[in-house]
Amino acid sequence: MRGWGEFIAAFLAFLLSHALPARPLLRRRLTARLGERGYLALYSLASLAVLAWLVAATGRAPYVPLWTAEPWHLAVPNLAVPLACLLVAFAAGAPNPLSFGGPATGFDPAHPGIAGLARHPLLLAIGLWALAHAVPNGDLAHAVLFGSFAGFALLGMLAIDRRKRRRLGAPEWEALAARTSLWPGAALLAGRWRPSAPPSATRLAAGLLLWLLLLLLHRPVIGVSPLPP
């Protein structure tokens, strides 16, 4: 385990930073002291700081190769990340009482919007990003990092479904979720959902701008160019 101390510490800190605030009693106490906005701001800053540390610690961890890098590996994140960014753009602020971060007001079960394609679009975006980045990073530390993120995203989707179903009650949850998809495109393939309008040009542009920003910042922030040589 020599040389793995920082990576393990950062990984544990990342887990705790997401597990502890989820405890209802702790969250209520923090919200009572800081207010809802103050709590969310503090939680967001702490999460970003811990994530930045984890990414840096992964780069400093001992290099243990698991598979040999191939030229085509870089194409995987370059194809997947734009899709993830589009998911984020279409999910941001969209009514979605079935997932986290989505307001319930304005949600129409007959026309669920992005939830028709994916009930948990933000978690799907994280999972897609993580799996795509695991391909060109074939060492143990990065495999653990990205594999864990993908696993958290998948388990998060299942856990949120269980929690929402319990809170709303099975009949209401099933009525709200009837035209949505746990797995991407499942409702479309089953004929339970069809897009009711063309994609928003504004959200398409926002998703592509987010992808371009990440592309431009990748080398100065991460230290590695995401583009093929």
Image (spheres, grey):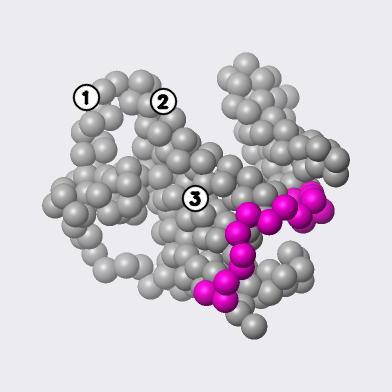
Frontmost of labels 1 and 2 is 2
Frontmost of labels 1 and 3 is 3
Residue 177 is at least partly visible in this image:
yes
Residue nearer the viewer, 105 or 41: 41
Give residue 92's position: percent from left, percent from top: 47, 54
User: Pointer 1: what residue?
Assistant: 171
Please tell me whether residue 39 is drawn above or below residue 69 in the rendered image: above
Residue 213 is at least partly visible in this image:
no
Q: Amino acid at mark 2?
A: Arg
Which residue sits furthest bottom? 229
Q: Which residues are magenta?
A: 56-72
Q: Secondary structure at mark 1?
A: helix
Q: CA distance from mark 3 to mark 2?
A: 20 Å
Name the residue: 72% across, 33% down: 12
Question: Contact (CB < 8 A) between labels 1 and 3?
Answer: no
Name the residue: 27% across, 45% down: 180
Q: Residues within 10 Å of mark 1 (few under 14, many from 20)?
A: few
Give residue 137's position: percent from left, percent from top: 63, 60
Q: Amino acid at mark 3?
A: Gly
User: Pointer 2: what residue?
Assistant: 163
Q: Is residue 21 left or right of residue 165?
A: right
Label whose residue precedes the other's in the sequence (3 or 2) = 3
Question: Contact (CB < 8 A) between labels 1 and 2?
Answer: no
Label whose residue precedes the other's in the sequence (1 or 2) = 2
Please tell me whether residue 20 is drawn above or below residue 206 in the rendered image: above
Q: Secondary structure at mark 3?
A: helix
Q: Quadrant of residue 173?
A: top left
User: Pointer 3: what residue?
Assistant: 127
Give residue 61's position: percent from left, percent from top: 79, 50
